[in-house]
Image (cartoon, helix red, strand yellow):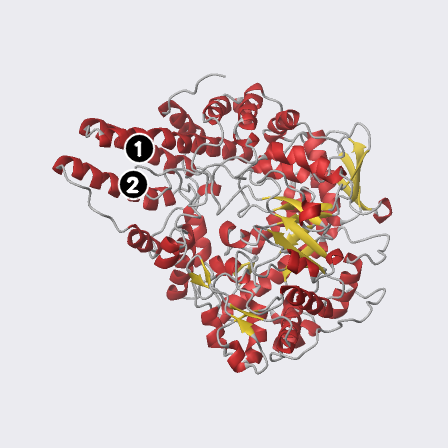
Amino acid sequence: MTRGGRRLPGPRPLALAALPAALLALICAGPAPGATAPGAGSPAPAAVRPDAPADARGAVRTAALAGAPRSRSFDTAPARAALERLLPRHHGQFTLVPDTAAGADTFTVSGTAGAITVRGSTGATLLTGVGWYLQHVAGADIGWPGDSIGLLPARLPAVPAPVTRSAQVPHRYALNDTDDGYSGPYRTFEEHQRQIDLLALHGINEVFVQVGAEYPYYRALQGFGYSAEELRQWIPGPAHQSWWLLQNLSGFGGPVTERLMRERAELGGRIAEQLRGLGMTPVLPGYFGTVPPRFAARNPGADTVAQGDWAGFDRPDWLDPASPVFRRLAAAYYAEQRAVFGDSTMYRMSPLHEGGQTGSVDVGAAAGAIQRALHAAHPGALWAVLGWQDDPTPELLAGVDTSRLLILDGLSDRYNRLDRETRWGGAPYAMGTIYNFGGHTTIGANTSVWLERFGPWRAKDNSALAGIAYLPEATGTNPAAFDLFTDLAWEPGVIDQRKWFADFAARRYGRPDPAAAAAWEELRKGPYSTSSGLWSESQDSLFTARPSLTAAGAAYWSPKSMRYPAGSVRRALDHLLKVAPELRGSSAYRFDLVDTARQALANHSRVLLPRIKAAYEAKDLPLFRKLTAEWRECETRLDAVTGSDPNFLLGSRLAGARSWGADRAEQDRYEYDTRSLLSVWGRRSTSEGGFLHDYANREWSGLVSELYARRWALHFGALEEALVRRAAPRAIDWPAFEEEWAGRTTRHPDRPSGDPYRLAAAVAAALPPAATG
């Protein structure tokens, strides 16, 4: 199998030969529970040769990121390499010039036709300048996903007059703690690299790196009374590790192998280095006290608190951060993390996420101890904490230096009457958005709320707004939302939503087109103008819901009704089908067409199911059969149209999971890890008692046909049988049905097939026309 473009054998050590001697010594050394992080508290040297040991290079890097004086220049090679990946036919027309004198996070774009110069303060800012040029001058889009660069002219257009932009906020953070699980825990380095390129192109400078985060735990805890085998049983499979790091569960989807953990750690280390090369901050998981069972019994003086239940899972125990044992374990953890991931200036931790038990622990004292342990290993590092539900609590904030804290507000666009300065006592925060939950394929976001709040929140007296936080639970959906939200941090004036979407439509397909403009105006007015108050995500599909004639949503916590007029999407589909033929060849057009056809079908499910229910209750068997046949036809069309774009394929996700296994048993285990997250999520107790089943529903080809359509067919069959027999319908054990699917190893295509235009046109022809207006 290959990983990161290199051929990897079966079980093997971490790529030791490629690592500097300082890293090699740390990795090969046994766990050191009492070790102090190398270099902790030592002043960073002013300059270090490129071939210097990693710990020395890390110290310089940490000082630079923390605000120490920078050199007047930096290596543009990583940005140049990214540019070559992003613009394979046009990269040679750009000159990238380092310019740290312009101030932090500033770029200038100028140049004549075919000779564009971008000056910038970091490699990532250079790429942001390129992104600005593509968006505002060349009229092209490189989105997440889809692009229109194939329609760029051979000679790029001139910049009418030099343009300089500076970031409006210092922190532009990206990736939810759940992103690795929902977006793809078994991705390759090239896939992560593409993600980093896109984030830099859109102005992000801080990125959460979760891949391989289990390895420092695995290494450090072997010095605290645990065997390697015990820890491999405790650590979940990669698809569920996000919630283990959040202290919500353990052990599910495993056991993991040491080979897998080493390879994931290597991958995470490469991701961190890729970010550093562009001048971006790799945000690494910090240590706040998660321990395996019976930790106190094996470590005298330790005080642990059982954390109780999370959605039916037993949470890992919490080691009181005020204890001396915590200080030793935290030091060991950070030393092991440094060995593979290097240093950073920003670490993610959310103690007591979604509940948990404090016991007799003083939360303020615990928070202070967590921050001191972080600073002992990484002096002055920033602690990033998620603003979610009641977190961070006043007790936690009272115990820390909030000047070294950043709250990532996950509720900025969800609720009304928010006063973050009062709620968090003036602690710095980033305005965030979570417009996607569980990886749902639904279109939409509260974009009008973003535009209404960002400027006024930033301009208010004593504002503590210090950034943006791009936090969908899964990335790779809603490219318009990604583009607009990241634009907030770079546009100096007020963004006009209507004009922004009109401009987006023009560059998304390579040039202005009346039909494209009309389509995106419908989408703007509909799913992209939902309001705050309760939800930040639009409704999901009933095709993906567990069958019931009264189903109102698939995921338990999703909206139970339409959040916008369904006709807007239906009309958008009609307009997209009229886009000029010469603009239909881009991956951006294909994705948008498929996604809009998919959403139009999904919205129709909310019209069709009540009709089926009415026919059943009226005992009208002919009408019931007619309507359920229409339902099945919609499912067939849904599976086919999503199968025509690579972003909607179950087979790709399953093939990626299996590629990490060294033998058939391990491959099957990682496939189950992936399938279970998409369906039952966990075991029966969590699926039912925790309401987690279908939380990660999405309309993907293969998933629709093999799980959702079969599930509805079984339900409708039982109802039809009941009508014929004039009896109550037979009960169906849905958790057993879904668990059987999760345990399958059936193969599905990992490449798209079919003509997306023809398939989308067939969807439009099969659906009733939308009302005008």
In this picture, residue 13 sits left or right of residue 87: left
- Residue wearing tag 2: 712
Q: Earlier in the sequence, mark 1 or mark 2?
A: 1
Residue 770: percent from the left, percent from the top?
43, 20
Separation of disc 1 and disc 2 at Cα? 9 Å
Residue 611: percent from the left, percent from the top?
30, 28
Query: Furthest residue to the top?
Result: 772
**Mark 2: which amino acid?**
Trp
In this picture, residue 732 sits left or right of residue 587: left
Q: Does dot 2 land on a helix, a strand or a loop?
A: helix
Residue 155 in view (yes/no) = no
Q: Residues within 10 Å of mark 2 (few under 14, many from 20)?
A: many
**Mark 1: which amino acid?**
Trp
Quarter holding residue 35? bottom right
Q: Is residue 340 above or below residue 442?
A: below
Query: Furthest residue to the left?
Result: 725
In this picture, residue 491 sits left or right of residue 629: right
- Taking depth in this image into account, of 618 and 152 the one nearest to the observer is 618
In this picture, residue 745 sits left or right of residue 296: left
Residue 686: percent from the left, percent from the top?
39, 57
Residue 544: percent from the left, percent from the top?
38, 41
Q: Is residue 197 above or below residue 352?
A: above
Q: Does dot 1 land on a helix, a strand or a loop?
A: helix
**Residue 316 image label:** none
- Residue wearing tag 1: 631
